[in-house]
Amino acid sequence: MDRIKSAYEMAMERFQQRKEVPPEEIEKMEHIPVGKAMAARYLNEKDFDFLSEMNKYPDKIKGYMAEGALETFLSNIQLPVDRAAFDTTKKALEGITLLKVNKDALREVYGQIEHLFNYYEKTLEQAFGQFKERFSAKMASSMQSIEKKMGAKIKVDPEKQPGFREEWSRVVNSFNAQYNQVLAEQKEKLKKVR
């Protein structure tokens, strides 16, 4: 009859079955976060010299750090919803340029991203105009009855009406989901550039 193993015996069996982590993997796990942190400093500090900091490390370690930095730069490329997002994206693209060798391929992808952003801004502006018109038309019927009761014309800004911001926010979220999908494809292209 088999005897029941103690928790200690089971733990010792699992310990003996564990796999040895290669030193390269440990170095990678240690230096990817360092690269991420350096990229964050580059994005946030105006005078941070990313390349000189990176060059303080051996080539093998720099590769791991570049991997972490690239991850941070890519995550900071966003649709230009406001000036801050646009500036951060621009700085992130500059950071990627520091990491990559094939500048021609980068320029091509950057051109595609710029085209995407221009199209996004124009389309969003057009969508806002159309949304505002539709919202105003919906409000017009209820405003006519109020004007009849008051006996005077009322000028109403649709943007200041209840529900306008909420409805517009839903439209923008749906709109952004489509464009973020295309932007994700461009980020994948950036990852693959040497």
Image: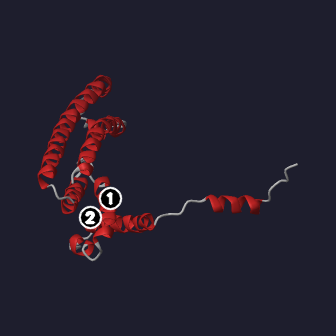
Which residue matches tag 2? 43
Which residue matches tag 1? 72
Residue 20 lies, with reference to residue 123, above or below; the image says below
Q: Amino acid at mark 1?
A: Thr
Question: What residue lies at 32% left-to-right and 66% top-to-bottom?
Answer: 65
Question: What residue lies at 25% left-to-right and 54% top-to-bottom?
Answer: 85
Classify the position of the C terminus by image quarter: bottom left
Q: Is residue 45 visible?
A: yes
Q: Position of residue 88 (x, y in %)?
A: 24, 58
Q: Disc 2 vs disc 1: Cβ atoms closer than 8 Å?
A: yes
Residue found at the very far bottom of the displayed protein: 56
Query: Quick one: 40 or 54, which is closer to the camera?
Result: 54
Question: What residue lies at 27% left-to-right and 41% top-to-bottom?
Answer: 185
Query: Quick one: 141 or 105, which is closer to the camera?
Result: 105
| Colour theme | secondary structure
Based on the displayed image, in which of its 4 quarters is residue 71 positioned?
Answer: bottom left
Question: What residue lies at 18% left-to-right and 60% top-to-bottom?
Answer: 94
Query: Quick one: 168 or 186, which is closer to the camera?
Result: 186
Residue 92 lies, with reference to residue 189, above or below; the image says below
The crowding category of the residue bearing disc 2, from other C-alpha atoms within 10 Å (few below 14, some 14 to 19, many at least 20), is many
Q: Amino acid at mark 2?
A: Leu
Q: Earlier in the sequence, mark 2 or mark 1?
A: 2
Query: Quick one: 118 or 21, which is closer to the camera?
Result: 21
Residue 183 lies, with reference to residue 67, above or below; the image says above
Q: Position of residue 191 (x, y in %)?
A: 27, 51
Give the numbered dot on residue 55.
none
Residue 122 shown left or right of residue 23 in the figure: left
